[in-house]
Structure formats: structure tokens, C-alpha cells
């Protein structure tokens, strides 16, 4: 008969508990699987990193191209900004030249031609958003649009426009030249 103590470890091994060699092999297999998974994850992250780096470089190139196109458009806009304005003034020039070409014009014809040319000029200015500042006498003095040349005693309220010495102009709601005015003095 065999020794009961010697058969006890064998019986535990036979009952389903793994041996130390099996445990080491299982642990090594788990470590190998974990290593393979980590390497796969690393490869996926490296691929994603490369993809993001490529997207970043493409985005940088797009930004540079957009900036370059915008700079070109701004340069062209500055260069040709007065083109429409100059084009609208050409008929005025033509009218002045035609009026000067008439050698025997009467004073009435010269006046009519000058008035027609002035209407053309005002129309060209208005089309290009150049608007007159011509305050009516008695209107409130506006330091943003008017420049007081002198203060005169008047029967009007203080700081009101008495007269306009020179019209002013705005362009696109910005004062190009203020109107030169005389203003009533405080009483």
C-alpha cells in the first residue's frame, strides 16, 4: 500500500487545481496576450497620431492659403478701390470738355452747361456714398459734422448754425470734411 500523504498532493492535482508549471504557462500566455494587445493599441495610437499630424499640416496649409488669398484680395481692393468712383466721374469730365470746346458760347449756355455738369457731379458723388453736409440755419451745432469758424451774436438759441461758409461731406457715414459754419453766441 502506498503512503496516504504522498497520494494527497497527487489527488489535488488530479482534482483540477493547476500545477505551478501550468500557472506559469498561463501567466506567460496572459502576459503575451497583454503585450500583443498593448502593441496593437500602440500601433493604433501611432497610426492615429500620424493621421492627426497629417490633418494638422493640411489645416495649417489651408490657413496659409486662405491668408494669402485674403491678402491678395485686400491688395486688389486697395489698388482698385477708386475704380468705380473714377468711372462715375468720367461723364463729368466729358461734359466739362464738351462745354469748353464751344468757342462762341453765350453766358446763358455756359451757365446751363455748368449747372448740368454740377448735377452730374453731385449724382456721381451720391452714387459713391459721398453725401453733402449742409446744415440749415437754426439747426443745432453738431461738432461731429460741423466746424465752427466763428461765433456771432444772433437772435437764435445759443450753439445753433447761423450760416454755412462751406459744405461738408460724409463718405459711407464717415465725415470726409466737416461743414464750416458760423454759430450763434450765448446770450
Image: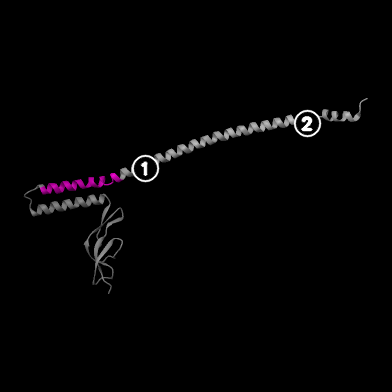
List the residue tagged with mark 2.
20
Report the magenta residues as a range: 78-100
Instruction: Name the colouring of the figure.
Output: one colour
Q: Nearer the viewer, residue 157 or 16?
A: 16
Toward the bottom, the furthest residue is 187
Magenta-span inclusion, residue 98 = yes
Q: Nearer the viewer, residue 10 or 113?
A: 10
Q: Quadrant of the C terminus?
A: bottom left
Q: Position of residue 92 (x, y in %)?
A: 18, 48
Q: Does residue 13 appear to the left or right of 134 in the view shown?
A: right
Q: Nearer the viewer, residue 128 or 21?
A: 21
Q: Position of residue 131 (x, y in %)?
A: 26, 55
Q: Using a 10 Å C-alpha cutoff, classify the residue at mark 2 as few (fewer than 14 neighbours), some (14 to 19) or many (20 or more).
A: few
Question: Separation of disc 2 and disc 1 at Cα?
Answer: 73 Å
For marks 2 and 1, the one nearer the N-term is 2
Kindly identify the residue that appears in the image at 70 percent across and 32 percent down: 30
Toward the left, the furthest residue is 104
Q: Main secondary structure of the magenta part?
A: helix
The secondary structure type at the circle numbered 1 is helix
Residue 99 image label: none
Magenta-span inclusion, residue 41 = no
The secondary structure type at the circle numbered 2 is helix
List the residue tagged with mark 1.
70
- Residue 74 found in image quarter: top left
Is residue 125 positioned above or below 164 on the image?
Answer: above
Kindly identify the residue that appears in the image at 67 percent across and 31 percent down: 33
- Residue 68 found in image quarter: top left
Amino acid at each position: 500500500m502506498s503512503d496516504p500523504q504522498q497520494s494527497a498532493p497527487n489527488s489535488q492535482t488530479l482534482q483540477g487545481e493547476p500545477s505551478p508549471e501550468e500557472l506559469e504557462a498561463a501567466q506567460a500566455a496572459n502576459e503575451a496576450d497583454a503585450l500583443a494587445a498593448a502593441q496593437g493599441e500602440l500601433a493604433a495610437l501611432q497610426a492615429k497620431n500620424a493621421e492627426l499630424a497629417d490633418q494638422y499640416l493640411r489645416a495649417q496649409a489651408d490657413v496659409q492659403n486662405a491668408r494669402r488669398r485674403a491678402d491678395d484680395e485686400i491688395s486688389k481692393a486697395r489698388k482698385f478701390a477708386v475704380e468705380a468712383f473714377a468711372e462715375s466721374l468720367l461723364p463729368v469730365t466729358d461734359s466739362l470738355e464738351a462745354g469748353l470746346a464751344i468757342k462762341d458760347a453765350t453766358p446763358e449756355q455756359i451757365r446751363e452747361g455748368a449747372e448740368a455738369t454740377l448735377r452730374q457731379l453731385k449724382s456721381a458723388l451720391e452714387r459713391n456714398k459721398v453725401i453733402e453736409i449742409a446744415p440749415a440755419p437754426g439747426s443745432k451745432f453738431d461738432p461731429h459734422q460741423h466746424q465752427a469758424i466763428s461765433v456771432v451774436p444772433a437772435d437764435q438759441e445759443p450753439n445753433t448754425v447761423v450760416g454755412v461758409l462751406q459744405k461738408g461731406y460724409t463718405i459711407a457715414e464717415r465725415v470726409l470734411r466737416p461743414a464750416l459754419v458760423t454759430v450763434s453766441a450765448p446770450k
